[in-house]
Image (spheres, rainbow, N blue to C red):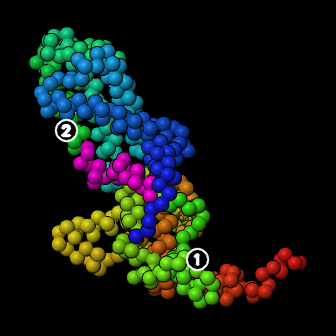
Amino acid sequence: MPVITNHRQRLKNMMLVAFGQRKMFQNLIPALLHFCVYLGFIIINFEVLEFIIDGIFGSHRFFAPYLGSLYNVLLNGFEFLAVAVLLACLVFLWRRNIIRVPRFWSKEMTPWPRLDANLILLIEIVLMIAILTMNASDQVLQTRSEMYPSTGKLLVSSQAIPLFSTLNTKSLIIIERLSWWFHILGILGFTVYITYSKHLHIFLAFPTTYLAKLTPHGKILTMPFVTQEVKTMLGMENENPEVQEAPKRFGAKDIDDLSRVNLLAAYSCTECGRCTAECPANLTGKKLSPRKVMMDVRDRLEVVGNSLSKGGPGLNDGKSLLGDYISKEEINACTSCQACVEACPIMINPLDIILELRRYVTMEESKAPETWNAMFQNIETNFSPWKFPINDRFNWFNN
Ligand code: SF4
Ligand code: SF4
């Protein structure tokens, strides 16, 4: 297993890209909206801490007596954030479903990924409404019973007080409790749901950015064993003293040939489609979509994992990532331009997987396209992709 080095740079990447969302800010408006939802997810969850304490100890607004006027400031902050999250989610729903931003409607965005994205947005909206409803009914109850500690005026939810003040106390208690239960069960349900959803990226973006390649994008990593063999053949000195064992397979045919970082990236992919929207192959009508590559790896992992957990054949089910999920036509369309790598907001590298699949086709199956074979032949004999003798390489310069 490769040794992970340069922890300082990796930590910096993680803090800037995953925590600070730096790459999102290439497109300001969606970035700001996404930042609101992200901030809401982190900060409003502090309020959930009080929900849990109240639930365990049977208290009501456990922190209110301890925090004094700070409690009011915090709750007002949460409420403004709740409104920002609510509005951001509405805009996201509008972009996805009404104006239909093309990257959310490309071929690989089948009904399930589209539903998944919409469901999360709807859940967030309902959870925010539940918080505001709970606070509004609670403020009315504070005027009717001493059991409800004062929160001070909450600027957003107090706007709904005229709606609630006409209700009798029993109805208000039911609304307040239902909102409380709805919110806590919603949060717990959400926590379970995201493990089945693309929203797992909330957590996995952190290790993914930490483990991302640190080499420049244009540097395509060679295979150490092949480098060693070529250098030995050419009588060159090998700077790497470690003797490389031949891998069990050159390149990748199925998920077990990919690195763990590749597999982690598949589960981290947000399905945002920024990579596909920038991919020149996709833009010129080719079958390739780097987002689909990531989704296919995840789908294959799911199938193999589910099969193994039921005692099934797992990887030996007669299928493989290459062929049954990703076709040769797709991988051959890639220009290795790295635009997808540059576009990804969480430093995922779909090209890494494409290159491994192509290596398998070329080195294990010897089935690279004919035109590529001619190029390989030229490189082998002329040390360049063109059909010029090696001695003519500088003719252009001399003339
Ligand atoms: S590297 Fe390949 S997959 Fe990525 S953007 Fe370029 S052509 Fe598309
Ligand atoms: S690989 Fe990156 S850019 Fe592409 S869909 Fe996934 S998260 Fe978005």
State the extent of the magenta-drawn residues as a range.
Answer: 190-211
Helix, strand or loop at label 2? It is helix
Front residue of 12/167: it is 12
Where is residue 89? Give x, y as percent.
38, 37
Q: Quadrant of the C terminus?
A: bottom right
Taking the image as drawn, is residue 208 in sight?
yes
Q: Residue tagged by mark 2? A: 185
Residue 291 appears at what percent x and percent y? 45, 59
Q: Which residue is mark 1?
A: 239
Mark 2 neighbour class, 10 Å CA radius: few under 14, some 14 to 19, many 20 or more? few
Determine if residue 273 is in view: no
Q: Is residue 205 left or right of residue 24?
A: left
The alpha-carbon separation of the residues under discs 1 and 2 comes to 59 Å
Q: Amino acid at mark 2?
A: Leu
Residue 321 falls left or right of residue 10? left
**Crowding at mark 1 (Cα within 10 Å: few <14, some 14-19, many 20+):** few
Residue 393 part of the magenta segment: no
Mark 1 belongs to which amino acid? Glu
* Residue pictured at 34% horizontal, 27% vertical: 78
Q: Residue at x 15, y 31 (%)?
A: 55
Q: Is residue 159 above or below residue 297?
A: above
Question: In the visual, does 84 lie left or right of 370?
Answer: left
Magenta span: predominant SS is: helix
Q: Residue at x 26, y 44 (%)?
A: 190
